């Protein structure tokens, strides 16, 4: 069986989705990068200011305490120091260390700063030749010219002495930038996938509708231009055929549109075996259809839509079958399984996904049903997916085998908003039913 697609897609989309995604992602990333830079700099400055402010405040408290003690002549030796402000020194007017904390013992004066008499408390960052910086407060004990000075401070915290804070902020910013860029790309992909799908759908549909319309117009114009050479009956019959194809396409398009819209109808409990039997009974005369249905195979969903799927599969199988069609209904691993098998020419593996695309029809299908819309299988797969199920074509010794799988009612695979059903009763014995049909030339939908 070779492939022929009824009509080709008209052109390519005039917008490259990858270009749109790239531009959108770059724009979002650029704006975010600007915000992250501003925010990162602000965060870095805020953290540095907070740490410096806390250190200087603690040093000020210690310096004021021992300055008061020095005025009263009550400075102990050594000077006790808390864990955060470890360096404390009492330095006289000549720059000699008179007293110190144990951690500052043997060290030269922490600073040469001597606050003036009118501003006796000052802060200072003192850095040595080895780049060792000390954050300290200098407190002049008295306004007298020979007043000693109390220095209280600590080594600059590692977070301020190194660039680790900046590295951490930059690393966090990069992670945020990458995450947001990826989410933007993914969101744009989802959005554009839907938009491009709708654009392609509209383009393909317009082409499929123009084909029968063009044929209808040509026949009518021919009848008007050459009334003596055209048989009115043939013209009317041709117009009716074109109208029938248009009607089939429009009807299926309406169904497809409703499927992709919101479904407000409450799902109902459906026994698949009974549904399949009803659909087989409603078939037009043709090759016999055999039903093998296990009892109590129940799903929840739309009866009308699932009947549409079963009806499409049965009509398709009956058109392509040589002598028989077999339908089985069973349950396996929490899934209801409906299999429709015919003994026709089958479908090549390369075409088994293509037949589910919009308006795709193979040569055999066009030969057997020239008036079909090419939407039946696409609609059927959409219905299966709407029920959290699948519809695919599997290998078969002869002919084609379509397999519809749906979550059994009450299982985890069913839709969350659907109520669970009571426990299943014991399965009824499998029953085989033959529906013999008289041969007919009627072509199904």
Image (cartoon, rainbow, N blue to C red):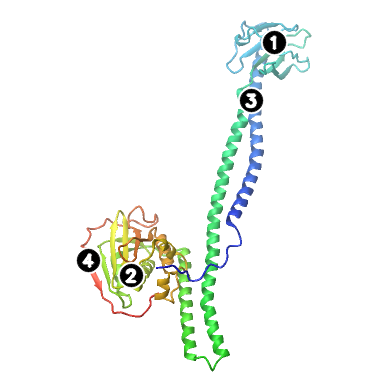
- Label 2 neighbourhood size at 10 Å, few (<14), some (14-19), many (20+)? some
Residue in front for this viewpoint, 116 or 326: 326
Which residue is labeled 4 in the image? 431
State the CA–CA distance, disc 3 to disc 4. 82 Å
Between discs 2 and 4, the one toward the N terminus: 2
Between discs 1 and 4, the one toward the N terminus: 1
Q: Which residue does the image show at 64% across and 32% down from the upper left?
A: 44
Which residue is labeled 2 in the image? 344
State the CA–CA distance, disc 3 to disc 2. 80 Å
The mark closer to the camera, 3 or 1, is 3
SS type, badge 1: loop
**Numbered badge on residue 109:** 1
Which quadrant is the N terminus positioned in? bottom left
Q: Is residue 264 visible?
A: no
Between discs 3 and 4, the one toward the N terminus: 3
Q: Which residue does the image show at 35% across and 80% down from the upper left?
A: 441
Dividing the picture into quadrants, the one containing residue 327 is bottom left
SS type, badge 3: helix
Between discs 3 and 2, the one toward the N terminus: 3
Q: Are marks 3 and 4 in contact (CB under 8 Å)?
A: no
Hey, which residue is sitting farthest left in the picture? 429
Which residue is labeled 3 in the image? 160
Q: Up-down: is 29 above or below 425?
A: above
Dividing the picture into quadrants, the one containing residue 342 is bottom left
Q: Is residue 215 visible?
A: yes
Residue in front for this viewpoint, 364 or 275: 364
Q: Which residue does the image show at 57% across and 41% down from the upper left?
A: 176
State the CA–CA distance, disc 3 to disc 1. 23 Å
């Amino acid at each position: 069986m070779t492939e022929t697609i009824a009509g080709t897609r008209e052109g390519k989309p005039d917008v490259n989705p990858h270009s749109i995604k790239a531009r959108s992602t770059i724009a979002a990333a650029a704006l975010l990068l600007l915000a992250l830079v501003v925010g990162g700099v602000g965060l870095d400055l805020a953290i540095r200011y907070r740490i410096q402010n806390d250190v200087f405040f603690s040093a000020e408290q210690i310096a004021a305490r021992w300055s008061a003690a020095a005025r009263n002549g009550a400075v102990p030796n050594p000077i006790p120091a808390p864990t955060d402000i470890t360096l404390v020194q009492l330095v006289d007017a000549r720059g000699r260390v008179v007293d110190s904390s144990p951690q500052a013992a043997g060290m030269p004066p922490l600073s040469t700063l001597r606050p003036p008499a009118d501003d006796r408390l000052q802060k200072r960052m003192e850095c040595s030749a080895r780049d060792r910086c000390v954050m300290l407060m200098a407190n002049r004990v008295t306004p007298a010219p020979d007043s000693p000075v109390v220095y209280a401070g600590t080594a600059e915290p590692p977070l301020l002495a190194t660039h680790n804070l900046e590295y951490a902020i930059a690393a966090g910013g990069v992670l945020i930038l990458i995450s947001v860029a990826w989410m933007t790309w993914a969101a744009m992909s989802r959005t554009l996938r839907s938009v491009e799908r709708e654009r392609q759908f509209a383009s393909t549909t317009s082409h499929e509708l123009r084909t029968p319309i063009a044929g209808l117009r040509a026949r009518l114009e021919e009848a008007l231009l050459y009334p003596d050479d055209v048989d009115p009956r043939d013209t009317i019959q041709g117009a009716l055929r074109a109208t029938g194809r248009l009607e089939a396409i429009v009807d299926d398009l309406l169904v497809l549109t409703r499927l992709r819209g919101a479904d407000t109808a409450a799902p109902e409990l459906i026994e698949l075996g009974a549904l399949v039997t009803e659909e087989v009974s409603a078939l037009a005369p043709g090759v016999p259809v055999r039903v093998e249905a296990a009892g109590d195979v129940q799903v929840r969903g739309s009866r009308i839509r699932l009947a549409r799927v079963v009806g499409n599969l049965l009509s398709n199988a009956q058109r392509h079958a040589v002598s028989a069609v077999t339908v089985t209904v069973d349950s396996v691993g929490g899934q209801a399984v409906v299999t429709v098998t015919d003994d026709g020419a089958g479908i090549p593996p390369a075409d088994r996904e293509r037949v589910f695309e919009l308006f795709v029809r193979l040569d055999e299908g066009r030969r057997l049903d020239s008036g079909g819309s090419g939407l039946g299988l696409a609609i059927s797969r959409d219905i299966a997916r709407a029920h959290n199920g699948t519809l695919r074509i599997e290998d078969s010794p002869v002919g084609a085998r379509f397999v519809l799988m749906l979550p059994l009612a009450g299982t985890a695979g069913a839709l969350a908003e659907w109520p669970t059903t009571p426990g299943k009763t014991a399965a009824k014995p499998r029953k085989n039913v033959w529906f013999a049909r008289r041969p007919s030339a009627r072509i199904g939908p």
